[in-house]
Image (tube, coloured by chain):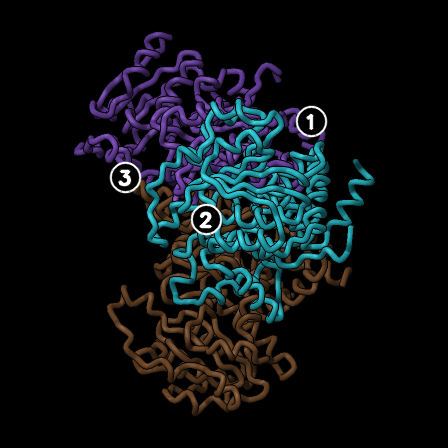
Chain colours: A cyan, B purple, C brown
Amino acid sequence: MDSSNRIYHCLTAQQLSLNLLQDICELADKIRKIAKTKEGMEYLASLLNHKRAMLYFVQPSTRTFLSFYSACQILGIKCAEVRDPKTSSEVKGESEEDTVRTFSSYFDLIIMRHSKANFAEKIAALLNSTNRPVPVINAGSGKDQHPTQALLDIYTLRRSFQERGGIDNKKVVFVGDLLRGRTIRSLAYLLTKYENVKQYFVAPPEFQIGSDIVAYLDEVGTDYEILEDFKKVLSEADAIYMTRLQDEWDAVDGTKAEIDFKRFSLTGDDLALLKPDAVILHPLPRRDEIAVEVDTDPRALYWQQMRNGMWVRVALICMIFSKEQSIIDYCSNNI
Amino acid sequence: MDSSNRIYHCLTAQQLSLNLLQDICELADKIRKIAKTKEGMEYLASLLNHKRAMLYFVQPSTRTFLSFYSACQILGIKCAEVRDPKTSSEVKGESEEDTVRTFSSYFDLIIMRHSKANFAEKIAALLNSTNRPVPVINAGSGKDQHPTQALLDIYTLRRSFQERGGIDNKKVVFVGDLLRGRTIRSLAYLLTKYENVKQYFVAPPEFQIGSDIVAYLDEVGTDYEILEDFKKVLSEADAIYMTRLQDEWDAVDGTKAEIDFKRFSLTGDDLALLKPDAVILHPLPRRDEIAVEVDTDPRALYWQQMRNGMWVRVALICMIFSKEQSIIDYCSNNI
Amino acid sequence: MDSSNRIYHCLTAQQLSLNLLQDICELADKIRKIAKTKEGMEYLASLLNHKRAMLYFVQPSTRTFLSFYSACQILGIKCAEVRDPKTSSEVKGESEEDTVRTFSSYFDLIIMRHSKANFAEKIAALLNSTNRPVPVINAGSGKDQHPTQALLDIYTLRRSFQERGGIDNKKVVFVGDLLRGRTIRSLAYLLTKYENVKQYFVAPPEFQIGSDIVAYLDEVGTDYEILEDFKKVLSEADAIYMTRLQDEWDAVDGTKAEIDFKRFSLTGDDLALLKPDAVILHPLPRRDEIAVEVDTDPRALYWQQMRNGMWVRVALICMIFSKEQSIIDYCSNNI
């Protein structure tokens, strides 16, 4: 493992180099092997049993929250959470910066989800200036960043294609609300790091991928296509990444969705058109964009994808606390 | 211990056979003995320290929630909870089935309370069809089922009567809101498994025990009596099981309680009428149906009953994860 | 360590004798040294790993809650919490006494914050009368008591002045809302136990220190001054204790703050007037009464003060469970 691949704060998808992605994914694979036995789980739980983490989730979240919570528990990290600002001192007029600095006084790791763009980065910079800095992991901020979701997506694609030459040379189709899904933006960015990946963006015009991403794809010379006709690319896709309409943002945006989203949904009938070794992903939660009958198809990987997220977060936290070599050694000696 | 007494999901009182009840109660007795020392507690906490549990409690609950939470902690199981749907992804339009399936991706045990009848059973069936099934414990669903409450009631009666030939041949008096207390329904059912137990149902006509239960008692030939006059049976009772008016259901039912519940209450004056070795139970929380002055009477067992619930849940979870033999062996070797 | 310095319930600042304060502070110092290594943290986490604590916080709190939560985790105590009464059985009409007695059935320690004065004391007395008493720690009740805040303030002052003869002979200036800050009241009381400490109370007349405290200071013959002019005493202070306007009480009080609180604030410009070895404290959360630019001054100790609170609570809990000798022995053998 290249010792230059260090990570302290995990704030943006942009900071994840190809080498770092690879190291985290390989570490996650090792951790899963260790986790298969009670003894292995006890070893993992001994790694960071002297650490405590604060999960500060101001926005509603089930999956990401529980995934991080479970990842911490697997490593023996004791967790506390602040989720509902009403039970906290913010009602007493405290600034958010003071609130998070409070966490750094009691905890060794802050995992945060916040509605403000760049808030995690701001906090990381603030903590770096104090005499008790602690690592910050961004678990979703504003509409822009959700780096660990991108990480788990890369990890899932990597595992899906491990017998087929990896992620290089694959066709990845993004479908749905591409404008507001922060996971899409990060993944589209990270996929440009692989060789010859073609990306398709299938969405109604109102919810197409942002022009900043398109500009970036142009800049790095990635092949891509922007279209509305989902059926047209169904049979070409190596991976289909479905997303839901994020209308919880509407109150903020003032935009209103009156679009027929059935055209951007995957049904049982569509399965016959897919390649036999294609994979279907979704960051979840879903609504109607994937019919429940698709769940039992072996190409439907979204539930595994979710569990992958837990393991890749275990690996990330191990990297942050410099435990990767311990895990590599344990694997060599025990598995 | 009969190896046929296996339990995976715990969903209904009906699935609890007499043999299984006996095994769980005996296991709970052993666990309590082990728990008396720090070393014993450390042994218990090592049994399932590689497992994590989700407590999904959509309905308000203090007692049952904390009892399960404590039971998990005693066994070293790491817990996470989802209690307030507002902080979860259900606000994003996810189906409840997807929400619970999410839990099964991260956790090894799901303990759930839900307002819908049969919801736990539905979820157990759904999980059985996936490639990551996990056990489900019903911690109360709808108005019908609350099997672990019935279990703790049986355990408390069994301990109360252990010097007097067990539960067989006892007279059990149920008092209060018998229509809507799910614990009464389950316990009335389970008591038919014992020999010659006579059941009395004391309630205003509007809140008498359901006709389905009466039909079942008739079918199996259990002796019972339905009445309004509490004083009449006070002096005959071996066990008095008080319940509160469940008017939190009223909003749903449209029924409104205008009944004088004082007639269905137990006061300090009543204590003189009770048998010296009778026991007073209550599932708690109580309102006015048991006067606070009754608490100090040695026959008032409701606080111990509550703590019994914790131990019997520890035993149940041990059974689910096949740890009963480990506990039996530990007891033989150490106690 | 004097074996007469026993503490079971921690309810009021008044019960903290000078000897007990000293023992707790010295124990906290030892615990911090142990906590510097993973091995030390593992030792601490083994001390009370057979215990479980209930954190019952009915009033909003971040700091005190997380501080106790962390303190328990450091000692291996497993925590559960009840913070929002809406998710508890209180909606079913249960009395608060029954609710807390429930906690005593499942847990070995109750840490509680409540809006009612004397509620923690009442509960401690109730539990003492049952057959399962457990220790109660008051984490803030009503406007009167917050003994562990007073404890951490004493601990912080003690550490600040350890090279300068301790707390004796120092000048302590309290500033802000002295009427409603319960921490001020407790600290003013405890400081009378030290030799020749002079106290200054700087506040608008409407929010001056309560007459009961003034009467007590007169009774024990402590030197003090009541004034409005903050600048006048800035240069004399050994410690400045800033507080915020507690207007969350206004809804209850009917009083309304129309006062210019800028006169009772500390800004970057004021720093030049302070003694070079003065210390600035604040119980936090703050609003505008300390400018953010003050944070980087080495005399600003409020963030350390907060972390001190965690360690002193670890020490208090160790005292309650009689673990002080174990810690003293571990220090002798390992550090």
- For residue B288, which numbered disc appears in the image? 3
- For residue B329, which numbered disc appears in the image? 1
Residue identifier under label 2: A179
Q: Which residue is drawn at 22% across and 34% down?
A: B262
| Label pair 3/2, CB-CB below 8 angstroms | no
Label 2 is found on which chain of the structure? A
Secondary structure under badge 1? helix
Q: Give percent across and percent down for residue B323.
A: 63, 27
Q: Nearer the viewer, mark 2 or mark 1?
A: 2
Judge from the rendering whether residue C271 lies leftward or rightward of residue A76; answer left or right: left
Viewer-closest of A142 and C280: A142
Q: Give percent across and percent down for residue A199.
A: 57, 42
Residue A52, placed above or below residue A244: below
Secondary structure under badge 3? loop
Judge from the rendering whether residue B259 lies leftward or rightward of residue A214; answer left or right: left
Mark 3 or mark 1, which has the lower sequence index? 3
Residue C89, placed above or below residue B2: below
- Where the C terminus of chain B falls, by quadrant? top right
Residue B114 falls in which quadrant of the image? top left
Callout 3: 10 Å neighbours few (<14), some, many (20+)? some
Viewer-closest of B226 and B214: B214
Extreme-right residue of the structure: A333
Q: Distance between the residues labelled 3 and 1?
A: 45 Å
Task: Report the amino acid beneath label 2.
Answer: Leu
Q: Nearer the viewer, mark 3 or mark 2?
A: 2
Label 3 is found on which chain of the structure? B
Task: Report the amino acid beneath label 1.
Answer: Asp
